[in-house]
Amino acid sequence: MEFTLLFLAVAVVLLAAWYGTRTLALALFAATLIACVVTYLHHASAVLNLSF
Amino acid sequence: MAPALAVTLNALGLYAIALVLIVAFGAQLILHELPCPLCLLQRIQFALLAVGPVLNVRFGPRPSHYALSLLVATAGAAFAMRQILLHIMPGDPGYGSALLGYHYYSWAFIGFAVAILALAAMLLFDGQFAAGTPLPQIGAFAHAAVWLVIALTALNVVATLLECGFAACPDDPKHYELLRFGQ
């Protein structure tokens, strides 16, 4: 579900960049990029079953 | 470099991003290989990479717009590198099938690295940022590029919703969660 929301957020950012103000697009962009990094860190913190 | 040429090159960049999204989507539909969470995250970064070029087309080229794309490309490369390292052990078959000898996450890393180099190359040309230069007209070529990327991103919203449903996406997805009626 989180990835669907992230794709939706990117679509909204693109529409804001094309139709909205520059400030709005930049703010939405920052929020989306931070959400992506947080999602990555959440998944990266999972236990890995590797046999080193 | 004149602003008009920079805008045209940004539009070309949008077509390149669209091509990446189309190839990823094609592999998903034709090979029936569902993207894993990290794969989806990399695909999201490719779509987010388009924000900088869209702003350049709409408001004219600015260094800050290129900086946005550089931030996204760096994050995307880090995500792809993480997945490469997950499958680095000898004997590990990797996730999904290989395309021309490389898995999709390896291609994603190469794609983000190329984007970083292309963005750095674009930033070398100060002429596009000259103050007082009138904004170039947005032609059909750039319009189509922007809408192609927006449409592909919207298509990915639907595909990801079908794949993951309303719960967390499985690590190794085998079927579309919302298309499992009667199974």
Image (cartoon, coloured by chain):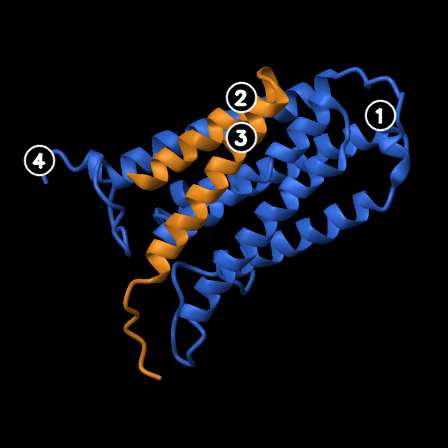
Looking at the image, is mark 2 or mark 3 earlier in the sequence? 2
- Mark toward the viewer: 4 or 2: 2
Residue at 82% over, 19% down: B136
The answer to whether marks 1 and 3 mark residues whose Cβ atoms lie closer than 8 Å is no
Q: Which residue corresponds to mark 1?
A: B4
Mark 3: amino acid: Ala
Mark 4: amino acid: Gly
Please check whether the numbered discs 1 and 2 fall on a single chain. Answer: no
Please check whether the numbered discs 4 and 2 fall on a single chain. Answer: no
The answer to whether marks 1 and 4 mark residues whose Cβ atoms lie closer than 8 Å is no
Residue at 53% over, 26% down: B150
Mark 2 element type = helix
Mark 2 Cα within 10 Å, few/some/many (few <14, many 20+)?
some
Instruction: Compare residues B68 and A7 and report the one nearer the observer.
Output: B68
Residue at 23% over, 36% down: B165
- Against B86, residue A41 (above or below) is above
Mark 1: amino acid: Ala
Q: Label 1, label 3: how many angstroms apart (C-alpha)?
A: 27 Å
- Chain assigned orange: A
- Chain assigned blue: B
Q: Label 1, label 2: how many angstroms apart (C-alpha)?
A: 22 Å
Mark 3 element type = helix
The answer to whether marks 2 and 3 mark residues whose Cβ atoms lie closer than 8 Å is no
Q: Which residue corresponds to mark 3?
A: A27
Q: Where residue B14 sits in the image (x, y, percent)? A: 65, 34
